[in-house]
Image: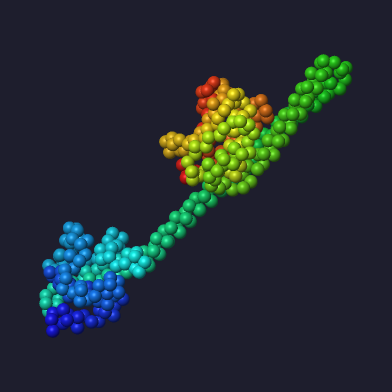
Amino acid sequence: MDKNQDDNQQFWLLDLIPNGIVVVRSDYSICFWNACMVEWTGISPEEAEGTNFIERYPAFKNPSVFARISQLFEGGPAVLFSSLFHPHLVPCPFPNGDLRVEKISFIPFHHTTGRCAMVMIEDVSGLTNQVIAYRDMKKVAETQLDDLKKARDAIYLANKKLKLLSGITRHDINNQLTVLMGFLSIVEDMAPGSTRDEYFRKINTSAERISAMIRFTEGYEEVGAQAPAWYDLPSLVDATAIQAPLGQIMVENNLPSGTEIFADPLIIKVFYNLMDNASRYGGKITTIRFSIENRDKDEVIVCADDGVGIPAGKKVKIFERGFGKNTGLGLALSREILDITGITIIENGEPGKGARFEIMVPKGMYR
């Protein structure tokens, strides 16, 4: 009976263990190769026993790995190789070709032939996959919680703005009604003529302002009515370009595919108002371009055109309610929609060379 056959008889119980077991001598020759290793590697005991374990699995030649093993045969303690740092020292594939994730222990013991080491290879693939799945689930949950917090904060801000707006609008309408009633009392006893006609024009202007304020509140009451969500930027611009009254104006959408923004559902009104204003007031405008820039930690969405631009003295006023040639409400409403999720907007173009609206999206509100 040769040495390996004798060893097989001594270690036959190790064939019953559902882990890979290899017994190596101090010269790293394999003297036992259990049934589990046969199943995992397809290598028979006859083929494995007597060969050099280190030569068969060269990953153990790594100096830092080999140093830990060699001390075993000099009286050192057992060695454990973590699956986190050394998952495939002994490649054992599944039927589909994926490698098992392994935890490997080298346990020294004395044998009749001298000091040996039992190499125990544990398959921890299932546990590893569970940990990975847990981490993925945790990441998804954290993202959802973050989105919920953003939505909660945005709704709180929207309600605050609505409360403020209702007070301001009520005050503005009352002022205009006072003016309107005053003019009516004046013209009541006036004889027909140019002066009376002038007062009627003022009455009509005041009535139009009241109507514009009411229309503004109709649009504003939708702000914050639904929770903010993630919206695909390129798709928003494409959808808006179909709806906006652009005529022959071209829209260049250079926003990167897959870029998303966390905003109030009325975000599409913002892009509509930008295109509508460019069409109305841009003069001989031919093109509106949308792009994105990285500035510090923020992303900046740029809407630029080749029209007449905005005069320097009006760059701030255009965002005020009532300012403008039409109702003066579009850009004011756009600013409030964006502010729900902490996004700001400014006009930063060069007068005479086209308007340039810059929408600053803070970190966490884009992805």
- In the image, 113 versus 42, the foreground residue is 42
In this rendering, the answer to whether 85 lies above or below 268 is: below
Number of callouts in the render?
A: 0
Q: Is residue 101 left or right of residue 203?
A: left
- In the image, 150 versus 164, the foreground residue is 150
In this rendering, the answer to whether 340 lies above or below 107 is: above
Q: Is residue 4 left or right of residue 287?
A: left
Indicate the position of residue 20 as horizontal and vertical percent values.
27, 73
Residue at 88% across, 17% down: 191
The N terminus appears in which quarter of the rendering? bottom left
Residue 347 appears in the picture as rendered: no
Indicate the position of residue 27 as horizontal and vertical percent values.
12, 69
Residue 99 appears in the picture as rendered: yes
- Answer with the quarter of the image where residue 74 lies: bottom left
Residue at 49% across, 50% down: 146
Q: Is residue 145 left or right of residue 60?
A: right
Indicate the position of residue 230 as horizontal and vertical percent values.
53, 47
Q: Is residue 360 left or right of residue 39?
A: right
In this rendering, the answer to whether 161 lies above or below 104 is: above
Indicate the position of residue 80 as horizontal and vertical percent values.
24, 66
- In the image, 128 versus 146, the foreground residue is 128
Residue at 70% across, 33% down: 213
- Answer with the quarter of the image where residue 273 lies: top right
* Farthest front residue in view: 248
The colour scheme applied to this rendered structure is rainbow
